[in-house]
């Protein structure tokens, strides 16, 4: 059978598996199987890629064995590291891992572009291939360095939001400088001249610097949108390099990832009532006052056992999880407490804000890990109207997504952002480690309301005390 036919058929099957897997990921019930289906599609694409080795020209034939050995070593290291780190990673570190893996994807696309440009192979195939190689290299390098900065921020290795004087001007100079060097590379290809290696090197250095300079000024509260955006960048870069290599699997996978990442980025930006440009170029989360003047009232502390008893005798309870729940690894104790309330006949539901946590879907994954049923987990738009008819709402480790200032305080950086209407519940409890302002640095008006009480302490220890209090009621 013709080798090329086998390759094309296998890539077609892999593409179907990608698309079907993505479709199944659209529902929490089938998401796990969807990931496995897409994974098998990628495994098929990787295995079939080895068949290209049988079609190499005579000049490359002597190097075939060595290349295959190098590829197998690289695959072994990559699979081994990914398997080990994936098994070891804590749920609190999942956003960092997503950012890191996403950066590796962008870096791989940039590496392909570098090889094709340095070797002159891309230029030899004409204008279109040269343009795609340059664009893929630019976007992939930006995704690599930007994702590494995002990883450093999320992992606490870069705690400051760094902004230089004339930051936007510097970024503009880097951007247009990168475009100019990319255009020079393309121009040399069109003219039939050899592209100077120094020019290609400068192009990639500028691209990497652009990714760093774009990401370092962005506040931590915007990291979920940034991760999603760089995910879209990686997909786009992979798709472009797929055209360069004429690899259908890369084209399809990259297009699917790029389009899905773009839609998710736009949805998350909308959930924050901000544009993507505002996320990238604003100074959100770095204001010293945050529009906090005029907040009335005081924070009122309550014992965890008293809060638990109040929920035990309530008819309806809504739980709003946040990053603090993940930090404390309290999701299993929380669900144990929920089951005790349900046994008492309490209607318990979870409310998820689109940008809760440190990455898209972070809270959904956290609750799924604890075994929380999907049918009691609701998105903002599906549950927000129910807070007004709720006896108790309890917030565990969330901040900006429940801040009423977003509705009325025009001086607040989060003004206009859709929030969960926790303040409309008859009673609200907020589980918090201390009196800090949270990740964005904005004071939360909810904490000062008359119907809100603060339950201070580590979320897991608090949940243990609540469980003991409920059990003591018999």
Image (tube, rainbow, N blue to C red):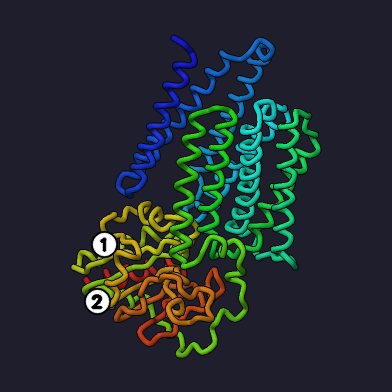
Q: Can residue 470 be seen from the camera position used here? A: yes
Q: Quadrant of residue 307?
A: bottom left
Q: In this view, does 281 lie to the left or right of 188?
A: left
Give the residue furthest to the left. Answer: 345
> Which residue corresponds to the image point at 69% horizontal and 35% vertical from the top-left?
114
Q: Nearer the viewer, residue 81 or 304?
A: 81
| Secondary structure at numbered mark 1 | helix
Residue 193 location (% of width, % of height) = 78, 29
**In the picture, which quadrant includes the C terminus?**
bottom left
Residue 145 location (% of width, % of height) = 65, 49
Residue 147 location (% of width, % of height) = 60, 50
> Which residue corresponds to the image point at 80% horizontal and 34% vertical from the top-left?
196
Q: Can residue 309 be seen from the camera position used here? A: no
- Residue corresponding to mark 1: 339
Q: In this view, does 117 lie to the left or right of 56?
A: right
Q: Which of 141 and 28 is in front in this view?
A: 141
- Residue corresponding to mark 2: 389
- Which is more N-terminal, label 2 or label 1? 1
| Secondary structure at numbered mark 2 | helix
Q: In which quarter of the image is residue 322?
A: bottom left
């Amino acid at each position: 059978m013709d080798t090329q036919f086998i390759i094309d058929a296998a890539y077609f099957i892999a593409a179907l598996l990608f698309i079907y897997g993505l479709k199944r990921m659209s529902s929490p019930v089938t998401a796990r199987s969807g990931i496995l289906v897409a994974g098998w599609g990628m495994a098929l694409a990787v295995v079939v890629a080895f068949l290209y080795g049988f079609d190499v020209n005579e000049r490359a034939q002597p190097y075939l064995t060595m290349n295959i050995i190098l590829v197998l070593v690289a695959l072994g290291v990559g699979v081994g590291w990914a398997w080990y780190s994936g098994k070891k990673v804590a749920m609190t570190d999942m956003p960092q891992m997503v950012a890191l893996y996403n950066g590796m994807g962008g870096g791989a696309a940039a590496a392909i572009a570098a090889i094709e440009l340095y070797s002159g192979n891309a230029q030899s195939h004409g204008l279109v291939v040269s343009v795609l190689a340059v664009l893929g290299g630019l976007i992939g390098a930006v995704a690599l360095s930007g994702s590494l900065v995002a990883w450093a921020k999320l992992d606490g290795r870069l705690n400051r939001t760094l902004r230089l004087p004339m930051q936007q001007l510097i970024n503009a100079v880097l951007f247009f400088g990168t475009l100019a060097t990319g255009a020079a590379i393309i121009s040399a290809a069109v003219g039939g001249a050899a592209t100077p290696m120094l020019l290609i090197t400068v192009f990639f250095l500028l691209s990497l610097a652009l990714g760093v300079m774009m990401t370092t000024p962005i506040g931590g509260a915007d990291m979920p949108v940034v991760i999603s955006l760089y995910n879209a960048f990686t997909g786009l870069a992979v798709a472009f390099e797929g055209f360069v290599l004429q690899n259908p699997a890369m084209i399809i996978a990259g297009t699917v990832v790029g389009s899905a990442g773009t839609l998710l980025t736009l949805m998350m930006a909308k959930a924050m009532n901000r544009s993507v440009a505002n996320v990238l170029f604003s100074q959100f989360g770095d204001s010293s006052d945050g529009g906090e003047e005029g907040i009335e009232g005081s924070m009122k502390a309550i014992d965890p056992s008293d809060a638990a008893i109040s929920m035990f005798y309530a008819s309806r309870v809504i739980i709003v999880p946040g990053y603090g729940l993940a930090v404390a690894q309290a999701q299993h104790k929380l669900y144990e407490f929920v089951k005790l309330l349900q046994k008492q006949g309490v209607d318990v539901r979870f409310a998820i804000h689109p940008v809760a946590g440190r990455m898209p879907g972070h809270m959904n994954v956290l609750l799924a890990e604890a075994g929380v049923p999907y049918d009691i987990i609701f998105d903002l738009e599906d549950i927000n109207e129910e807070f007004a008819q709720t006896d108790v709402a309890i917030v565990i480790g969330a901040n900006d997504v429940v801040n009423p200032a977003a509705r009325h305080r025009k001086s607040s950086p989060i003004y206009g952002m859709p929030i969960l209407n926790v303040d409309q519940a008859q009673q609200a409890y907020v589980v918090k480690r201390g009196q800090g302002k949270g990740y964005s640095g904005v004071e939360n008006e909810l904490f000062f309301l008359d119907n809100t009480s603060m339950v201070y302490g580590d979320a897991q220890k608090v949940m243990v005390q609540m469980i003991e209090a409920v059990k003591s009621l018999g």
